[in-house]
Amino acid sequence: MTEKRWLPETLFDDLGLRMTFAVDKVLYEQETEHQHLVLFEHKHFGKMLMLDGATQVTTRDEFVYHEMMTHVPILAHGRAKNVLIIGGGDCGIAEEVLKHKTLQSVVQVEIDASVVAFAKEHFPEFATPVFRDKRFESVIADGMKYVAETERRFDVIIVDSTDPQGPGAVLFTKEFYAACKRCMAAGGVMVTQNGVPFFQPDELVASVGLFKSLFADAACYVAAIPTYIGGHMAMGWAAKDRKLRRHPVRTIAARYQKAGSFKTRYWTPEVHVAAFALPRFIAEHVKGAKKR
Ligand code: SAM
C-alpha cells in the first residue's frame, strides 16, 4: 500500500505554520520557466493548483475570490468597457469578467505560458468559455512590462497575481502601480490580490501606502476564502474616483439587474457594499498606512 502524499502550503513557514493537503491524485506537475506548478485532486477541494507552495485556486472555493475580484470593481464603476487582468492564467477571473455583456474588451496578461496551457487542459470550466469569447485577448508577458508600454487604456484593472515572491514580486511595487495608473482611463479603478491581513499585514499596509500616494482613493475590501488560510483575504482598492466604493446597495442592485443578473454564489449587492466595512484591526492597517 503506497504512502499517501501530503502537499504542504509553505507560504507561512516563517510564521511556523503549514497547512497540508492529502493528494488523491497528481494530475500535472512541472517546473516551469518561472515557478513550480502542481495540480492535484483533493477529496474535499476538488482540483487544486499550487504554485511555489502557495495555493492558487481550487474548484470548491474559487467562486468566492473570483466573484469578489470581478463584480465589485466592474459594478462599482458602472460604465466599464475595457478590462485588464494581470496574472490570472487559470482564467477563473476572466470567466467571471466576461459575464458582463456590456464590456467590449478583456485583456489577460500572464507571464507563464504553461499556466494558460494547463488551464485549457485542466480547467476547461474556466478556459473554454473564455477562449471562445471574441472580446478576450490572452497576452503572455510580464505584467510590469505590459502596463509600462501599452498605449491602451482600461476602465478596470484586476491584479490576480501570486504573492510578492518570485515573478509576482514586481506586481507589488510603486513602479507597477504607477504604470497601472498611467494606463487606467479617467474614473477607473484597480483591485489587487493583497494577501491575508492576519498573517500578511505588511503586504497590505505597503500596497495601501503606495495607493495613497498615487490614486484619489485607496482602501481595501475583504472576503473569506477557505483555502487562503488566515481569515479575511484583503483585496486592494485604488481608484481615480472616490465615489466608486460609496454607492448604496440599491445602485449596485440596479446595475446588476441591468447586467443581466447573472448567476453568483458569493457576490450579492449587499455583500458588495458590506465588504468595505472592515474589521477594526484591518481598518487600522489601512488608516495607518503611510504614503510611500
Ligand atoms: N488567485 C491566486 C492567488 O490569490 O494567489 C492567483 C492565481 S493566478 C494563477 C496568479 C498568476 O500570476 C500565476 O499564473 C502567475 O504566473 C502570474 N504572475 C506572477 N507574476 C506575474 C507577472 N510579473 N506578470 C504577469 N503574471 C504574473
Image (cartoon, rainbow, N blue to C red):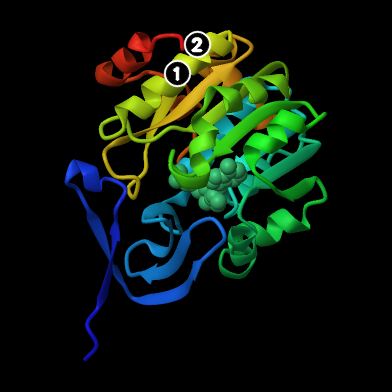
The three-letter amino acid code for the residue at tag 2 is Lys
Q: Is residue 157 above or below residue 182?
A: below
One can see residue 3 in this view: yes
Secondary structure at numbered mark 1:
helix
Which residue in the protein does label 2 denote? 212
Residue that numbered label 1 is attached to: 208
- Residue at (47% x, 44% y) in the render: 162
**Does the beta carbon of the residue at mark 2 sit less than 8 Å from ligand 1?**
no
Q: Are marks 1 and 2 in contact (CB under 8 Å)?
A: yes
| For residue 259, above or below residue 9 | above
In percent of width and height, residue 21 lies at 28, 63
Q: Identify the image quadrant of residue 116.
A: bottom right
> Gap in Å between the C-alphas at discs 1 and 2?
6 Å
Q: Is residue 262 visible?
A: no
Please say if 37 is above or below 194: below
> Of residues 237 and 28, which is closer to you in this image?
28
User: For the residue marked with disc 1, what is the amino acid?
Assistant: Val
Tell me the quarter of the image containing the N terminus: bottom left
Q: Dot 2: few (<14), some (14–19), or many (≥20) neighbours within 10 Å?
A: some
- The percent position of residue 228, horizontal first and vertical second, equals 34, 45
254 left or right of 196 in image: right
Left or right of 15? Residue 132 is right
Q: Residue 18, how many percent across, how many down? A: 22, 53
Nearest to the observer: residue 124 or residue 219: 219
Q: Is the CB of the residue bearing disc 1 within 8 angstroms of ligand 1?
A: no
